[in-house]
Amino acid sequence: MSKFDTWLHRQAPTRDSFERSRFLRPFAQRVFHPALWRFTRRSVPRGVALGLLVGIFLLIPGIQIAGVALLALPFRANIPIGAAMTFLSMPATTPFILLGSVYVGESVLRLNNGSGHFYQLIETSAPLSAWGDYVWNEAPLALVQGIAGLGIISIAAALIGYVLSAWFWRWRISAKWRRRSKSIASRG
């Protein structure tokens, strides 16, 4: 077992930690199916993609892992890898994810410039009536743009994560086969 394998197995959430989750108790029999806990060339990239999708889109720590575990059932994704990938959206990265989602949402949907008006209200020390007008008229569109941006970012991250993890898996297996064939050739 390589150093990476050892590190990965130490970092991945354990089956026991999932069994203690109150969110997953009703689904325990299905979630703890052994096929969802094996590290295979198909289940690992699916777990990475699912973990990134749910982890970035939901941004609620306790629900992210439960969401990955439940969505792993129909997609036959690796649950420990998916749960580990949700930790990409931690308190240090969440502000950047949210700022990026607002920017992407405004760029794609172009409904209004909600964030620009928001900063203008802050800079001009606007009265309470201006803030009320913003909250009732522009903030809902800005929220829709932010959610759309969050969806776009999470889907893009999931696709990129899937491709990179599938490539890494292939590279790792081929490197193992090359080492094995070299050791066989050197013996014989």
Image (cartoon, rainbow, N blue to C red):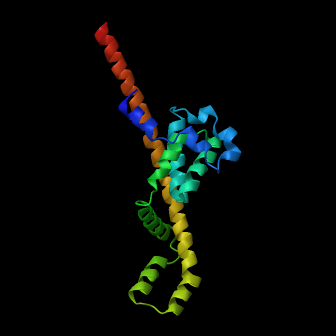
Quadrant location of residue 16? top right
Any part of residue 92 in sight: yes
At horizontal 51% and vertical 91% (from top left) the residue drawn is 128
Residue 89 image position (x, y, % from top left)? 46, 56
Residue 94, compared with residue 125, is above or below; it is: above
Q: Is residue 1 left or right of residue 34?
A: left
Query: On the rendered image, what quadrant is the C terminus found in?
Result: top left
At horizontal 48% and vertical 58% (from top left) the residue drawn is 153
Given the current orientation, which residue lies at the most extreme right position? Answer: 26
Residue 154, compared with residue 69, is above or below; it is: below
Residue 69 image position (x, y, % from top left)? 60, 45
Q: Is residue 76 left or right of residue 180?
A: right
Given the current orientation, which residue lies at the most extreme top position? Answer: 188
Residue 160 image position (x, y, % from top left)? 45, 48
Query: On the rendered image, what quadrant is the N terminus found in?
Result: top left
Total tally of numbered discs in the picture: 0
Given the current orientation, which residue lies at the most extreme left position? Answer: 186
Residue 56, compared with residue 169, is above or below; it is: below
Quadrant location of residue 168? top left
Any part of residue 113 in sight: no
At horizontal 53% and vertical 70% (from top left) the residue drawn is 145
> Foreground residue, 106 or 73?
73
> Foreground residue, 140 or 106?
140
Residue 121 image position (x, y, % from top left)? 44, 86
At horizontal 56% and vertical 53% (from top left) the residue drawn is 64
Residue 89, compared with residue 13, is above or below; it is: below
